[in-house]
């Protein structure tokens, strides 16, 4: 059964998956001192950053909002920020967002217990300790709902489906990996154990990821770590708990699963020439093509598509332009 259907029908599963969403994507309620004035007097007060979910994917954020709103009605508790009747579009970034209420954190942690990321857990506990308008619910640190992922394969698959919607890299190319900064290394280590338990990865340990390119761009990047999901693992995860809520990512996953099942070695030169012809024909017919969409047309992975595109670029046949975080490809106009 789809993990999102399970979240909508089972409170414990909702809380477990919500804690993963909190770790991977939600802004943490970090405390800071704010100076306020009342007439001539100044005073310091402790304020917390909003527990906010913000992302480009309207489908996934809309689904999380709707499921959370349903539990609000069932439990008769406020789980979403009072001013949010629906998600909002941020003017500057164009991303969708909404705030969880502070009590949402308390309910999620009271059900889950100790979550496998110290940084996220400590930030939540600090926020809950400073409740003024809510009654605190006790959190049992000896409880760990996450152990269910090591016992229930379907639920473990659901956790990875949600991670593919939110955090995983390489979903579009079929090279799915969960990659996060050092602050979340303990969470990655736990999720690696889950993937190893169900034979979904070939990794024996986390791999470090180079951040040198980011540093050259002036980005203050912290160390990154990752592990990969193998293609058989991807097939099993999708079968047990799919589909993804992001329709584009879901199409990419289905394509790469089907491609791996249908793969036949036709000989390097034969398949190479056919692929190149398909790519050129598609770019001539359509403007602003991406390597992701070209993989659907050519029937090969994006790394193969990119190899052809770079060679065609060197020959002066195609050209690329940066658009946001990706490149778009067109036939190069003769000058």
Image: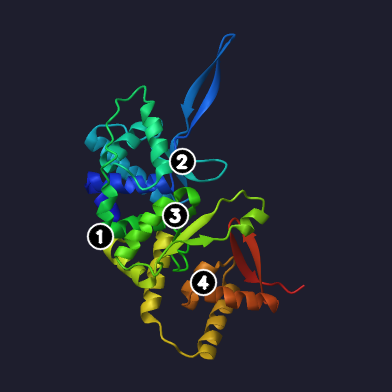
Distance from label 1 to label 4 (Cα)?
A: 29 Å
Going 26% across and 40% down the picture, which residue do you hit? 111
- Which mark, by number, is residue 154? 1
Closer to the camera in the image, 47 or 162: 47
Disc 3 + disc 2, Cβ < 8 Å: no
Residue 324 quadrant: bottom right
Q: Name the residue under label 3.
A: 167
Residue 126 percent location from the top left of the image? 40, 32
Among numbered discs 3 and 2, the one appearing first in the sequence: 2
Q: In 3D space, how far apart are the residues under numbered discs 3 and 2 (Cα atoms)?
A: 14 Å
Q: Residue furthest right?
A: 335
Q: Where is residue 331 in the image (x, y as percent from the top left)?
A: 65, 73
The first of marks 3 and 1 along the sequence is 1
The quarter of the picture where the N terminus appears is: bottom left
Which is more N-terminal, label 4 or label 3?
3
Q: Can residue 100 be seen in this view?
A: no
* Along the line of sight, the residue nearer the viewer: 292 or 170: 170
Secondary structure under tag 3 reads loop
Q: Which of marks 4 and 2 is in front?
A: 2
Name the image quarter holding residue 269. Answer: bottom right
In the picture of the structure, the residue carrying the numbered disc 4 is 302
User: Which class describes the residues within 10 Å of circle 2: few (<14), some (14-19), or many (20+)?
Assistant: some
């Amino acid at each position: 059964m789809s993990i999102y259907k399970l979240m909508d029908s089972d409170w414990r599963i909702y809380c477990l998956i919500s804690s993963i969403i909190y770790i991977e994507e939600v802004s943490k309620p970090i405390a800071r001192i704010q100076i306020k004035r009342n007439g001539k007097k100044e005073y310091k007060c402790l304020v917390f950053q909003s527990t906010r979910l913000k992302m480009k994917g309207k489908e996934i954020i809309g689904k999380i909002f709707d499921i959370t709103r349903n539990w609000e009605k069932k439990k008769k508790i406020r789980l979403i920020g009072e001013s949010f009747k629906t998600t909002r579009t941020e003017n500057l970034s164009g991303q969708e967002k909404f705030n969880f209420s502070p009590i949402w954190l308390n309910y999620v942690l009271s059900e889950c217990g100790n979550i496998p990321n110290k940084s996220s857990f400590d930030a939540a506990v600090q926020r809950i300790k400073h409740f003024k308008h809510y009654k605190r619910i006790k959190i049992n640190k000896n409880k760990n709902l996450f152990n269910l992922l090591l016992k229930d394969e379907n639920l473990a698959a659901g956790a990875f489906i949600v991670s593919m919607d939110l955090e995983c890299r390489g979903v579009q190319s079929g090279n799915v990996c969960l990659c996060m900064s050092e602050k979340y290394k303990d969470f990655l280590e736990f999720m690696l154990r889950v993937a190893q338990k169900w034979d979904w990865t070939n990794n024996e340990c986390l791999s470090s990821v180079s951040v040198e390119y980011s540093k050259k761009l002036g980005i203050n990047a912290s160390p990154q770590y990752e592990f990969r999901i193998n293609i058989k693992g991807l097939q099993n995860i999708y079968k047990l708990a799919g589909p993804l809520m992001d329709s584009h990512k879901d199409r990419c996953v289905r394509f790469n699963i089907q491609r791996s099942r249908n793969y036949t070695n036709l000989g390097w030169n034969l398949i190479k020439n056919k692929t190149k012809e398909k790519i050129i024909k598609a770019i001539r017919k359509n403007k602003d093509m991406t390597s992701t969409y070209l993989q659907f047309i050519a029937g090969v992975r994006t790394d193969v598509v990119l190899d052809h595109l770079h060679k065609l670029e060197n020959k002066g046949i195609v050209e690329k332009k940066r658009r946001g975080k990706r490149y778009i490809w067109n036939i190069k106009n003769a000058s």
